[in-house]
Amino acid sequence: MKKKRKKTIAAVLGALLFAAASIGAAQARGIGTLSSEYPVSLSVQIDPATITDDDLREIRAAGFEFVRFGVRPPIRSVNPGLTDYSKLIQRVRKARLDAMVTLFGGKEIWGHEPGDMRGGGGGNGSKEDRFADFAADFIKAHSADVAIWEVWNEPDNKTFLQPALVRDFGAATSALCERLAQRQIRPDIIVGFGFAKLPFVGGGGGGGGGKVPSELEDAFVSAARSDCLTDISIHPYRSVPETALADYQRLRAQLDRRQLNKTGIVASEWGYASYMPVRNQGMQASLIFREYLINVAAGIRLLNLYSWRDRGQSYFSKEDNFGLMSKSGEKKEAYSALTEFLKIARHSQKVSYDDARGASRLVLRRGESMLHVVWTQGAEQSVWVPAAAGAKCTRVDFFPQMREGSCGSRSDEGFSVKATTSPVLLSISG
């Protein structure tokens, strides 16, 4: 009888533990839950008004797993074309891609005057309430088909939020978080706010100098502590990618200091333009490639590149030339280098990263092979790559186009590589 009782108690305890584990797994949220075929999952910015189904298929075939685009409320001043976002989301899914959807309005959080509305929301309530209703309604309607939600885009940039209304942003965010809680909407991954500058670290990196307004930082901390936002999203634009590593570490330390240990970091927009006379396509390709490698080194789970296609055709306009593809659809060097690397790096994991006097070496493991990627920020340098006696070594160059060849002569159980600003890869096996 005692044995039977013990078995019954053990069975009940086992069931309770299993249930608790299941609940814990079900409640796991944030960018840390993201799975990927690659060391860093890649997204690319698309234009909802011009993206074609052929583009989406090409994006998926190239190794991208996400596309990012903004959704605007039905207001004449900020959404004159009234894009069919529901249809776009379904087209993205059909192409076997996931969507990262950014929710934002105009400079004033929600349009200008009540008469500026174009239906589906009316003009009642404060602008903060109207934004909250718009965002919560859209999330609820598309929760099954959108993998990552992002609240706002660069509120610290006057293009997207009037500086005089920064003080109202916290109220708008709180209103949205309240709506989500009331309606029991808990997206697995919901990030904010797509900061143009690096928050919490006193300016510097990111999208230029200056400091993020404290009101925006406070709004983020409040939303993250209430479990409304799962992660922070930033736009780490800078002259060279390698400086992002220290900034990621500084941001991580500041998040931890604010008891936001579970809050992950997402690079939701970052790119380099090829525009003359500042930067040709080869330089753009090198910087974008290194941008990806630095995010691998930093352990960032998702990187969104800006952008898929050039906005215009002027060779001298920075804003016209951020694309991996030209306006007419020709693949740039950045597209070729990055996509060829992704073919090799698929199913690999980071082993180590080191930077010695400006010479970088990132090591990945793929099955039985060790992938050593080496490059510099400036002048050519020699980088040592260890290899056991008898190991096979293949060198892969990506610039100006991919080619495979010999690693050169072995000496002292390894190879010496002349590293430049254009990364090369040594694959060592056996």
Image: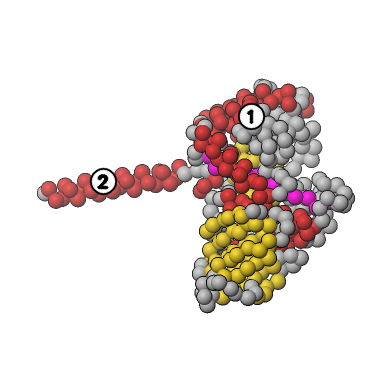
Q: Quadrant of residue 421?
A: bottom right
Residue closest to the eye, 188 or 325: 325
Give the answer, above or below, for where 299 lies relative to 427.
Answer: above
- Residue at 49% x, 38% y: name it: 261
- Residue at 80% x, 37% y: name it: 80
Q: In which quarter of the image is residue 120?
A: top right
Percent x, y of residue 195 = 66, 37
- Residue at 55% x, 40% y: name it: 252
Percent x, y of residue 129 = 64, 25
- SS at circle 1: helix
Percent x, y of residue 30 = 53, 43
180 lies left or right of 95: left
Q: Name the residue under label 2.
A: 12
Provide the residue span drawn in magenta: 263-275
Label 2 crowd bin: few (<14), some (14–19), many (20+), radius 10 Å = few
User: Residue 216, labelled with which disc?
Assistant: 1
Percent x, y of residue 114 = 75, 24
Q: Tell me the distance, in whole angstroms, between the alpha carbons under discs 2 and 1.
A: 48 Å
Residue closest to the eye, 212 or 150: 212
* Discs 2/1, front: 1
